[in-house]
Amino acid sequence: MKIKFWGVRGSIPCPGPLTTKYGGNTVCLELRFKASDRLIIIDAGSGIRELGNYMMAHDLQKGPIRAEIYLTHTHWDHIMGFLFFTPIYIPGTKIKIYAPVHYEDEPLEHVMGGQLAYRYFPVRHAELASEIKYFDLKEGRFDLGDGITLATKYLNHPVLSLGYRFEYKGKVFCTAYDTEPFQNLFCTDPDDPSYDEVMANEGEQAAKEANDRLEAFFSGADLLIHDTQYTREEYISSKVGWGHSSFEHVIAAAKRTGVKRLALFHHEPVRTDAQMDELTMKYCNPDYAGDTEVFFAKEGMEIEL
Ligand SMILES: [Zn+2]
Ligand SMILES: [Zn+2]
């Protein structure tokens, strides 16, 4: 498998002189396979625009474009680049889009197609020259053919969000973003009038089990790309419940579960190159991360497994 980062930021693109080293586009990953011409794209943030340009220059010469897009979820930063993905305007292109759907009565086609209204964009869905098919995706395990298997796992985010685990030729590549640690949903303060000891203990157990299940999902991965939008300090002070994780939590989980390589990902948009270099010194070394190789994902970076 070969994975390439086309967008690494969360929330909103942040181009400019302070982000040239790590990149300013929102999330998009390209996944290719050695013995197959399958092309899988994960998320359609603003980074997919450059990927589309690359495909127009390189893939189109070999024949009509075929791609599968797996969206982790449909938050704006994960779909905002789709209408600037040039292959969708080329006759003969066939795209399959898979994503979890939060509300069963609101199909994926409407969620994605909702961007194609004149009040947002000058082109309508019917005017796209390509064939686009939509598929709702749930938690499960799927044989994608060509020796590729995919397992999916619900994460902890304000809308349904899926983690992906691809296995190919004995190698494992996982994504787990956008997500934050599962929390006890019941009151844990004995002085609070709503406190109930049984409920509090059950909530604690449920959160632990949910976190254990996610760790088992990415356990032993050759590459894990995980949400690390915040430092622990930032997370605790004001970001609990926003659906993102801290470096400290994620690196500890990766170490515990024998993840070989961990890409810190879904970077906070206000984080500058200089600040990320500083965080690299702190987190990306064996003293802190043990046997897990930890690094900040950068736009343009390629990893072969
Ligand atoms: Zn996001
Ligand atoms: Zn999100």
Image: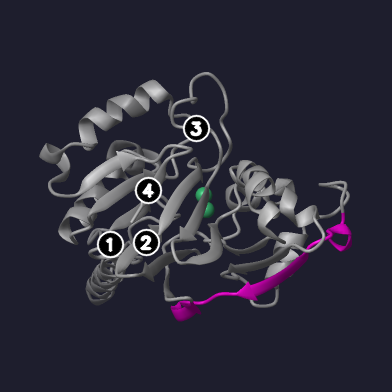
CA gap, disc 3 and disc 4: 17 Å
CA gap, disc 1 and disc 2: 7 Å
Mark found first going from the N terminus, 3 or 2: 3
Which residue is denoted by mark 3 in the rendering? 23
Residue visible at 14% across and 49% down in the picture? 291
Identify the element where label 2 is drawn. Answer: strand
Q: Is residue 143 magenta?
A: yes
Label drawn at residue 44 = none
Q: Are marks 3 and 1 in contact (CB under 8 Å)?
A: no
Image x and y of residue 119, in percent? 86, 47
Residue visible at 45% across and 54% down in the picture? 178
Label drawn at residue 303 = 4
- Residue 135 visible from this viewpoint: yes
Judge left or right: residue 122 versus residue 216.
Answer: right
Mark found first going from the N terminus, 3 or 1: 3
Q: Nearer the viewer, mark 3 or mark 4?
A: 4
Q: Nearer the viewer, mark 4 or mark 1?
A: 4
Mark found first going from the N terminus, 1 or 2: 2
Rate crowding at label 1 as few (under 14), some (14 to 19) or many (20 or more) other CA atoms within 10 Å: many
CA gap, disc 3 and disc 2: 21 Å
Which residue is denoted by mark 1 in the rendering? 221
Q: Are marks 1 and 2 in contact (CB under 8 Å)?
A: yes
Identify the element where label 4 is drawn. Answer: strand
Instruction: Please give the range of residues in magenta.
Output: 124-145
Image x and y of residue 303, in percent? 37, 48
- Residue 227 visible from this viewpoint: no
Q: Nearer the viewer, mark 4 or mark 2?
A: 4
